[in-house]
Amino acid sequence: MVREFKLPDVGEGLTEAEIVSWLVEVGDTVREDQPVAEVETDKAVVEVPAPVNGTVREILAEEGEMVPVGEVIITFDVEGEPVEEPAETDAGAADEPEPAVTPVDEDGSEAPAETAAEPSAKGGRVFAAPSARRLARELDVDIASVAGSGPGGRVTESDVRAAAEGGTEAEAEPETETSEATSTDGVQSATRRVSDDDGAEATEPASTSAEAADRDRTLAAPATRKLAEEKGVDLDSVPTEETRDGEAFVTPEAVEAYAEAQQAAQQADAEAVSAGAAGDGQTVAAPSGEDERIPYKGIRRTIGKQMERSKFTAPHVTHHDEVDVTRLVETRGNLKEEAEQRGTKLSYMPFVMKAVVAGLKQHPMLNAQLDEDNEEIVVRGDYNIGVATATEAGLMVPVVKNVDRKGMLDIAEEMNDLVGKARDRSIAREEMQGGTFSITNFGAIGGEYATPIINYPESAILGLGAIKDKPRVIDGEVVPRKVMTLSLSIDHRVIDGAEAAQFVNTVKEYLETPELLLLE
């Protein structure tokens, strides 16, 4: 029997997620709880486990596709299980029989789409890609009334658009399209649709050239799909001789060959344009490099929305200062080897975190948050310090809880663990929540001053600049000292400028005299 598996809610308040990669292929045998896909939420990448023991029947979402929670993303063949009723049916459709397998002629090609698509048109189970379902909702089209022209009567986006543009007439007389035609040399490619005005048969076989392939569905391993994405190749356009379960199957070698053919053709076109002359004898210049479009989604979009909310909600003011950390550099250097022997990498950040907590205790408004709904300023009793971390997906802020109750090595070990999990995308949502104050270290890449954006709903964030040798006057003599810059951004609704300066002075005192941290 067939078991459908819907994208679960893998995070608090999640409404959609991106399919990062498939860990299985059609035909693979899986066991219950075996990871079958990696899914990216707004915070991290998580694995989605199989709900049953069975065989992968069909993968219904492409890698890189945004899928709503509750959408069917994969189906399994499970022996002895009853068929799960589909969620998307018309009233009374539960009594309709399951659609038959797509008719196949003796030569291996599918029967006309009108026959294959009949079940969906009558209101039974609808075979459609998630993207086609979303498009149907956007265009206010009843997906169950659309005749599918894809393999097995599958409803494609073009079918939905045709139904939206042509209404009932388009639904009643769908254009015939054979999903895969076999040319004389055995290479499978799609046939194009031709309207009656073209004066040609609707199922005229397309060329087997690379440009002609245009399938609605192509099977390929996750690694092959990733390769195609890297090469900028549309899998449905890659000619192939191989099939699996009657579907076209593309190999990495076919993708490589097609990508090389595309590059050669583009190069030839560019050379022709560059060398050619216009009618008036002027040389036509070759086009410059193409723009790259990166999808604004997932973690990057979440970060952007959070930054936007913070910047346009809290009036930011930034206070800049410098601190002589010569003794701190010496202290950290003396303790670094001992920390490594205990299995901990000791950076400057734990010292700064302890100094910040000391400053927050003396200036509690820096550890406060504005409850706008109740019109109250909430002074937090915990000291949970967030550490802004640069990752491939964008800026993340792991939170070290209860810093005031932990020793230096404990803070260093926990911080290193959280930062590592943030960078490999395995960090849990709760490990980035509950912060009361944040620190960002832009000095790690050489910066000195910045205007950090507050990690809303917190009220302040401290930016650390690079430690550099600078001249200072000590006992009437100019000497080189280790100096670090500080940039404190505050929510001016909660914190006054004078209090911000006093807080920075306290932090400076502890960093200039690190022995004071032993008292905290």
Image: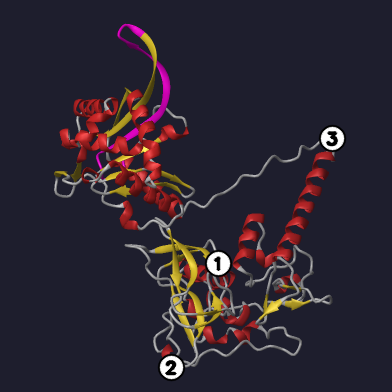
Q: Is residue 457 magenta?
A: yes
What element does badge 3 sit on? loop
Query: Mark 2 against mark 3, which lies toward the viewer?
Result: 2
Q: Which residues are magenta?
A: 452-477
Residue 95, numbered label: 2
Q: Earlier in the sequence, mark 2 or mark 3?
A: 2
Farthest residue in the top direction?
476
The residue under label 2 is which amino acid type? Asp
Separation (CA) of disc 3 from disc 1:
49 Å
Q: Nearer the viewer, residue 315 or 254?
A: 254
* Residue marked by disc 1: 62
Residue 280, numbered label: 3
Q: Name the residue at 43% across, 20% down.
A: 469
Give the x, y percent position of residue 467.
41, 27
Give the x, y percent position of residue 488.
30, 31
Which quadrant of the rendered structure holds the C terminus?
Answer: top left
The number of discs equals: 3
Left or right of 507, for residue 289? right
What element does badge 2 sit on? helix
The residue under label 3 is which amino acid type? Asp
Q: Name the residue at 54% across, 68% down.
A: 22
